[in-house]
């Protein structure tokens, strides 16, 4: 049986982003370790960590039979450009290499990725399909032979000889399979955390911290659930497994004990000092989810008392604000015991998808959170702050249904938290994701980019973000990201920041607030934000020099 050599590459999507952290491509290392254990030689190259030229040299200097790219939709054009750069290189080497795409976008938009130059797609969780491909693919196969053997593998998509899509659904994910991927494999994985941490130590000597939110470089990632139960209008995550397996996907969760064992493993093996629990919704939002988080916190608290876990170990997660709202009789109240338990276990940050404080927009098709109310958000945020559990307020500007006064309302309400121990992060547009409820809706037009296939010269439109229906907001969103970069550059120049000194995310959010308030003519608000931004940066420098 042939064992091909394979290279797995991350998307180019974040290579130009401003980073105050660097995340291991966890999914690719799951694949790598699965392939390695089955005798397949597999390398991983992270384009957030290595340069494109290093990737090109790796391709030139290694005899890769297969190259897989974990693609992303929002930077599809750039991913495709790099794909064709690599295809040209292997062609010049007289090497026949199979190019595979994987990930959410590849699964949910497989027809387009294949049309644009990939040989095939691995859909859903790709461990089993990729292993079978590695064991059976031969560069000597012609196209007809390739299609023939691919058609016998579950969890792949490929074009037939007439360019028609063949989509072989994966088998429905079972609880045992999920636990094997996210627990058993994770407990035996080899991940180069120390290389990443060393890289960040060199870059981050000037990292600025603000609002008491600690920055820990030695951070490990953990995934504990198989899907999100929400149905946000803009989000594709719930559709991923359902599309891959052509059936509704069950929710599976690692137990509190399993999560605790993963924590112990990463501390002892790698020396991790902090953990990001990267589920879309860690708490899940039901009774079983609440109990799991409570039990996990109890294990952490007890583990620290026993000396199994260093006292300084911290955790962060992302979840929904409404997960902290429970019923008591006929009333809705904040789940204070859960918040206090998480604070006691040293959850130092909880990232919340607030999106907007507009009551109307919360329930709009774009956001689609019918159970949520703006006051719930404020109640949860204040309860967290009072309990020393620091939230991140994640906002989205340019929601299609948004009106200028609603955007200003969100800015004004968020400004109330500027002096409190929390973080603020702003997406400057509502990105379009294949598989989301809004995708391809005639009622929600998009701003597109046009990409030309260098092989076929065919041009395709790639939807990037949804266009606000309000003319003034539409004009703002077109320029907001570029203006943000200029505003940040001016701020760096004003305070003489070097390239290794990252602006606090709350300062970046204030830059966005400044631009929006000025553009919409709210001059008093603009002055208030400008003053607060100067106070924030000045205070940060004072702390850095203490």
Image (cartoon, helix red, strand yellow):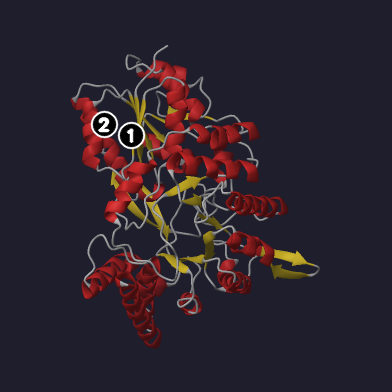
The residue lying toward the viewer, choosing from 310 and 465, is 310
Residue 416 falls left or right of residue 204: right
The residue lying toward the viewer, choosing from 453 and 244, is 244
Check contact, mark 1 vs mark 2: CB within 8 A: yes
Residue at horizontal 52 percent and vertical 32 percent from the top: 185
Residue at horizontal 44 percent and vertical 30 percent from the top: 33
Residue at horizontal 35 percent and vertical 26 percent from the top: 6
Give the SS element for disc 2.
Answer: helix
Q: Position of residue 335 (x, y in %)?
A: 68, 65
Q: Position of residue 546 (x, y in %)?
A: 32, 72
Seen as rendered, the residue at the extreme left is: 92
> Label 1 neighbourhood size at 10 Å, few (<14), some (14-19), many (20+)?
many
Q: Which residue is mark 1?
A: 117
Q: Is residue 518 visible to us here? A: yes
Which badge, 1 or 2, comes first in the chain's sequence? 2
Residue 238 falls left or right of residue 506: right
Give the SS element for disc 1.
Answer: loop
Q: Work out whether 122 lies above or below 131.
A: below
Q: Residue 516 shows which numbered tag?
A: none
Q: Work out whether 197 lies above or below 362.
A: above
């Amino acid at each position: 049986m042939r064992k091909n050599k394979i290279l797995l590459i991350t998307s180019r999507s974040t290579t130009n982003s401003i980073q105050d952290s660097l995340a291991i491509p966890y999914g690719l290392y799951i694949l790598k370790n699965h392939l390695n254990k089955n005798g397949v030689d597999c390398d991983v190259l992270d384009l957030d960590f290595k340069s494109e030229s290093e990737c090109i040299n790796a391709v030139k200097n290694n005899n890769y039979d297969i190259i897989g790219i974990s693609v992303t939709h929002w930077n599809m054009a750039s991913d495709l450009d790099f794909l064709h750069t690599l295809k040209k290189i292997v062609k010049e080497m007289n090497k026949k290499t199979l190019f595979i795409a994987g990930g959410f976008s590849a699964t949910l938009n497989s027809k387009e990725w294949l049309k644009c130059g990939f040989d095939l797609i691995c859909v859903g969780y790709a461990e089993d399909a990729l292993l079978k491909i590695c064991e059976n693919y031969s560069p000597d196969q012609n196209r007809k032979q390739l299609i023939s053997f691919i058609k016998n593998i579950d969890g792949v998509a490929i074009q037939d000889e007439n360019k028609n899509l063949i989509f072989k659904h994966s088998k429905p994910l079972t609880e045992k399979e999920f636990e094997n991927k996210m627990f058993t494999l994770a407990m035996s994985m080899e991940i180069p955390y120390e290389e990443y941490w060393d890289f960040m130590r060199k870059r981050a000597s000037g990292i600025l911290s603000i609002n008491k939110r600690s920055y820990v470089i030695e951070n490990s990632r953990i995934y504990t659930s198989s899907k999100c139960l929400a149905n946000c209008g803009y989000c594709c995550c719930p559709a991923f497994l359902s599309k891959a397996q052509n059936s509704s996907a069950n929710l599976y969760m690692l137990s509190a004990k399993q999560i605790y064992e993963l924590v112990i493993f990463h501390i002892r093996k790698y020396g991790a000092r902090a953990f990001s629990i990267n589920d879309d919704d860690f708490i899940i939002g039901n009774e079983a989810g609440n109990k799991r988080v409570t039990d996990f916190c109890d294990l952490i608290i007890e583990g620290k008392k026993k000396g199994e876990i260093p006292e300084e170990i911290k955790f962060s997660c992302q979840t929904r604000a409404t997960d902290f709202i429970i019923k008591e009789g006929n009333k809705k109240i904040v789940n204070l015991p859960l918040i206090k338990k998480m604070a006691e276990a040293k959850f130092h940050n909880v990232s919340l998808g607030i999106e907007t404080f507009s009551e109307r927009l919360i329930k709009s098709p774009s956001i689609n959170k019918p159970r949520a109310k703006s006051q719930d958000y404020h109640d949860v945020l204040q309860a967290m702050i009072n309990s020393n559990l620091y939230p991140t307020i994640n906002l989205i500007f340019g929601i299609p249904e948004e009106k200028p006064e609603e955007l200003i309302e969100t800015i004004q309400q968020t400004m109330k938290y500027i002096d409190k121990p929390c973080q603020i992060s702003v997406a400057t547009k509502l990105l379009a994701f294949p598989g989301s409820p809004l995708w391809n809706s005639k009622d929600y037009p998009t701003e597109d980019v046009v990409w030309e296939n260098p092989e076929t010269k065919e041009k395709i439109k790639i939807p990037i973000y949804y266009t606000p229906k309000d003319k003034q907001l539409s004009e703002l969103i077109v320029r907001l990201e570029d203006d943000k970069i200029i505003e940040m550059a001016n701020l760096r120049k004003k305070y003489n920041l070097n390239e290794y000194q990252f602006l606090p995310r709350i300062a970046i959010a204030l830059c966005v607030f400044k631009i929006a308030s000025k553009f919409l003519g709210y001059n008093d608000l603009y002055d208030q934000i400008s003053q607060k931004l100067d106070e924030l940066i000045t205070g940060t420098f004072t702390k850095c020099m203490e």
